[in-house]
Image (tube, rainbow, N blue to C red):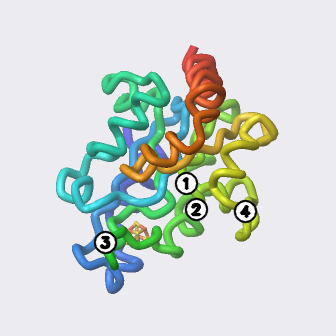
């Protein structure tokens, strides 16, 4: 039987709204199910994920799984984990870095997709774009300050840096992340899935 969420996901996968801005064309990469109690809101797929169609199947995904303590089987089980970037398609790159998520995407799809999930859930906000959208983080706030204030985030929301290669240097400069944030993150993740 086709559910309303199946219909919505089919609409997402057929979306071409900002095709004119996507150098490799639309390929929305999303994972979720009505029972997903851990939601990971990232930025946008990179070119590797665009090619595979598998979310977080790259070095950043490896780091995110290490941070959260999630094994690949759990991470890729939509019954447990929703993977919902701020932009569902690869936005292209400039100056050696990926462009920001397309601004049309989250306003068009997120509210409807999130409404299909359990009310009690943990949402990991990975990177500044997700934190601005879901924590109201002010534009002048550094990512370091936003993550350092993780304990003050509203219940059910957890800010994280993007786990790109740059995060390794950032972690060396900010040892409190490994000492304080990661243990709290793993505990919150375990609790959300228990
Ligand atoms: S990025 Fe989002 S809005 Fe743009 S084509 Fe892909 S799914 Fe549609």
Q: Secondary structure at mark 2?
A: helix
Identify the residue position indicated by label 3 in the image. Answer: 96
Q: Secondary structure at mark 1?
A: loop
- The label on residue 141 is 4
Q: Viewed as shown, does residue 68 lie left or right of 160? A: left
Who is closer to the viewer here, 187 or 140? 140
Residue 80: x and y, percent?
Answer: 47, 27
Q: Of the two numbered discs 3 and 2 on the same chain, state the one appearing first in sequence.
A: 3
- The label on residue 129 is 2
Q: CA distance from mark 2 to mark 4?
A: 12 Å
Characterize the local packing of mark 2: few (<14), some (14-19) or many (20 or more) Cα atoms within 10 angstroms: many
Labelled pair 2, 1 in contact (Cβ < 8 Å): yes
Q: Viewed as shown, does residue 5 lie left or right of 150? A: left
Q: CA distance from mark 3 to mark 2?
A: 19 Å
Labelled pair 4, 3 in contact (Cβ < 8 Å): no
Q: Quadrant of ligand 1?
A: bottom left
Q: Secondary structure at mark 3?
A: loop
Closer to us: mark 4 or mark 1?
Answer: 4
Q: Of the two numbered discs 3 and 1 on the same chain, state the one appearing first in sequence.
A: 3
Q: CA distance from mark 2 to mark 1?
A: 6 Å
Labelled pair 2, 4 in contact (Cβ < 8 Å): no
Residue 73: x and y, percent?
Answer: 32, 23
Q: CA distance from mark 4 to mark 3?
A: 24 Å
- Res 57 quadrant in image: top left
Characterize the local packing of mark 3: few (<14), some (14-19) or many (20 or more) Cα atoms within 10 angstroms: few
């Amino acid at each position: 039987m086709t559910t309303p969420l199946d219909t919505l996901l089919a609409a997402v996968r057929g979306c071409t709204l900002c095709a004119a801005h996507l150098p490799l064309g639309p390929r929305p990469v999303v994972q979720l199910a009505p029972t997903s109690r851990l939601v990971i809101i990232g930025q946008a797929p990179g070119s590797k994920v665009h090619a595979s169609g598998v979310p977080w199947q790259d070095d950043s995904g490896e780091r995110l799984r290490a941070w959260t303590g999630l094994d690949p089987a759990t991470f890729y089980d939509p019954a447990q984990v929703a993977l919902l970037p701020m932009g569902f398609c690869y936005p292209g790159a400039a100056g050696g870095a990926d462009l920001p998520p397309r601004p049309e995407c989250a306003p068009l799809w997120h509210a409807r997709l999130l409404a299909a999930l359990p009310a009690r859930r943990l949402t990991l906000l990975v990177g500044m774009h997700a934190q601005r959208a879901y924590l109201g983080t002010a534009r002048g706030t550094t990512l370091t300050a936003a993550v350092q204030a993780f304990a003050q985030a509203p219940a059910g929301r957890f800010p994280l840096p993007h786990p790109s290669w740059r995060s390794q240097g950032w972690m060396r400069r900010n040892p409190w992340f490994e000492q304080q944030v990661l243990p709290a993150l793993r505990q919150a993740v375990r609790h959300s899935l228990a």
